[in-house]
Image (spheres, rainbow, N blue to C red):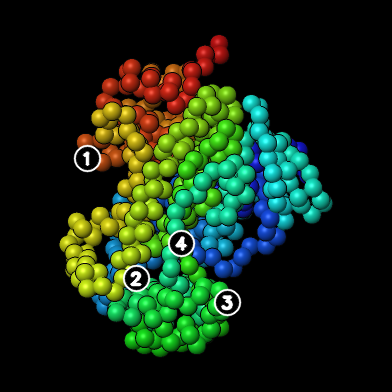
């Protein structure tokens, strides 16, 4: 085993690998243990949305994901002429990226290992004990049982999380009764456009193309909801359902895998117990409607990573870790609520549900309604709680060009490469930021963030506003002390 890490991550899925890349990129020693010896081809997630791509862009890690994905600027709605227009978004990534979860994990693993994280496949956590200074973890790997001591442990080990079970944290929720079908396969007669979906009385079928020429096929067939999820799915069965719902033979051929599945909605009661934290599916799981599961897990990692770094580097109190649950729990709770409503909307065959679907499809012709729906799916509307009546704190900050020096960063997001705070505006770095230079980068915007944004904005390492105001006086100083710790004297 390598030397004991500062942070041990249990689980090598999207959340665990994204967190490992974050921590290792900050210079925090971390290990990822995963009981799997190889990556599963069967996975639910098949898209990466704009906000997740923005976060990866901030760290310079988005290119590998884009290389394996297929840009879908107009995902289907489910009727003959309905689609979502991602071009309405203020982002450098105006599309939903269609990509198998296994390829997203490959890209995140490359980033994590390149940054210095140590991955230990075939290694399972069997128990842990914590004290005031750290956590002792029992592991069983290829070389037998061993123990590792870490400052912190993060459970990213999925729905059946061993970490959560050992902590005794409840995972409340329910299982859905309906059985759905899913496959990755080649199509001999794919419809146009490539991203395709239909909803009718029989159910829903959706097709998502991948860069390698295969398609993700997802089917909700009301006539087959009661089929047990463990009954093998045949090519003939899937083809019959697709033809009945789509009204055409798409020629499903050469499937990589086929599966029935039932989803569940569950939420951990707590995300932190002492020095042990939960993220990703270990903290929350829901149906794949809207493709939000992978997004939420990776965004957990970006919220938690810089906070662990701040505590381990000694410039923030341990209480900063409490803000992880305070900020991420409501996001997950709202995501569970919306995906549950979406699933019921898609699967019900009652007259009110059918009328609501028709009304919803019609309302998408109204541009403000359409844009609001795309904003929610993209993740660009997510915000963290603001203090008092502050309208800016917690908002996502869009990318903008900078007044760049020769050889320097050209875009705002490039200032986040090292994971520090960013102070930006029209007048450079105010004197109030003196003493925080080692934790803060500054840049002058070449164009405003948007209408009525204040002149100066302090941005957290995860791209959300920490403070904003016209006068960089006491408010900025208080915000810097709160988020970045005490200033350091300038060496003379």
Q: Residue at x 76, y 50 (%)?
A: 140
Q: Is residue 411 left or right of residue 169?
A: left
Query: Which mark sits nearer the N-terminus, 4 or 2?
Result: 4
Query: Which mark sits nearer the N-terminus, 4 or 1?
Result: 4
- Helix or strand or loop: what does disc 3 sit on? strand
Does the CB distance between marks 1 and 3 fall below 8 Å? no
* In this view, 311 is above or below 403: above
Q: Which mark is residue 256?
A: 3
Q: Residues within 10 Å of mark 3 (few under 14, many from 20)?
A: few
- How many angstroms separate mark 3 from mark 4 (CA)? 27 Å
Q: Residue at x 50, y 27 (%)?
A: 319
The residue at which mark 2 appears reads as 347
- Helix or strand or loop: what does disc 1 sit on? loop
Query: Which mark sits nearer the N-terminus, 3 or 4?
Result: 4
Residue 56 visible to an observer of this rendering: no
Circle nearer the viewer, 2 or 3: 2
Query: Which mark sits nearer the N-terminus, 1 or 2?
Result: 2
């Amino acid at each position: 085993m390598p030397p004991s890490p500062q942070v041990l991550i249990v689980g090598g899925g999207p959340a665990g690998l994204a967190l490992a890349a974050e921590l290792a990129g900050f210079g925090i020693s971390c290990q990822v243990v995963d009981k799997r010896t190889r990556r599963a081809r069967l996975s639910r997630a098949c898209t990466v949305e704009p906000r997740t791509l923005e976060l990866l862009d901030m760290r310079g890690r988005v290119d590998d994901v884009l290389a394996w994905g297929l840009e879908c600027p107009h995902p289907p709605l489910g009727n003959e002429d309905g689609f979502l227009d991602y071009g309405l978004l203020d982002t450098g990534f105006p599309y939903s990226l269609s990509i198998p979860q296994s390829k997203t994990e490959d890209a995140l693993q490359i980033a994590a290992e390149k940054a210095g994280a140590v991955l230990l496949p075939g290694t399972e956590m069997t128990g842990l004990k914590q004290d005031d200074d750290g956590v002792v973890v029992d592991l069983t790997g290829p070389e037998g049982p061993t123990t590792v001591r870490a400052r912190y442990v993060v459970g990213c080990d999925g729905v059946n999380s061993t970490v959560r079970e050992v902590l005794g944290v409840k995972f409340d929720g329910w299982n859905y009764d309906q059985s759905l079908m899913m496959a990755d396969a080649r199509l001999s007669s794919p419809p146009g456009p490539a991203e395709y979906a239909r909803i009718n009385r029989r159910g829903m079928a959706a097709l998502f193309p991948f860069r390698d020429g295969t398609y993700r096929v997802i089917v909700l067939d009301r006539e087959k909801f009661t089929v047990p999820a463990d009954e093998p799915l045949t090519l003939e069965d899937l083809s019959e359902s697709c033809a009945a719902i789509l009204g055409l033979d798409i020629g499903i051929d050469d499937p990589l895998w086929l599966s029935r599945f039932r989803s569940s909605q569950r939420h951990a009661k707590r995300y932190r117990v002492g020095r042990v934290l939960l993220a990703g599916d270990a903290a929350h799981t829901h149906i794949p409607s809207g493709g939000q599961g992978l997004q939420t897990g990776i965004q957990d990692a970006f919220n938690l990573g810089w906070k662990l770094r701040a505590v381990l580097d000694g410039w923030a109190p341990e209480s900063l870790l409490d803000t992880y649950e305070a900020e991420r729990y409501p996001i997950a709770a709202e995501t569970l609520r919306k995906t549950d409503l979406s699933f019921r909307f898609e699967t019900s065959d009652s007259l009110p549900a059918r009328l609501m679907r028709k009304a919803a499809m019609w309302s998408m012709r109204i541009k403000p309604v359409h844009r609001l729906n795309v904003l929610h799916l993209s993740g660009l509307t997510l915000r963290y709680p603001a203090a008092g009546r502050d309208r800016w704190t917690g908002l996502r900050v869009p990318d903008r060009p900078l007044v760049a020096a020769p050889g320097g960063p050209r875009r705002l997001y490039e200032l986040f490469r090292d994971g520090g705070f960013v102070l930006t505006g029209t007048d450079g770095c105010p004197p109030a930021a003196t003493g925080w230079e080692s934790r803060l980068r500054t840049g002058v915007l070449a164009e405003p963030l948007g209408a009525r944004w204040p002149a100066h904005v302090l941005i957290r390492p995860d791209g959300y506003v920490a403070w904003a105001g016209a006068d960089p006086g006491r408010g900025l100083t208080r915000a810097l002390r709160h988020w970045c710790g005490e200033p350091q004297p300038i060496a003379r």
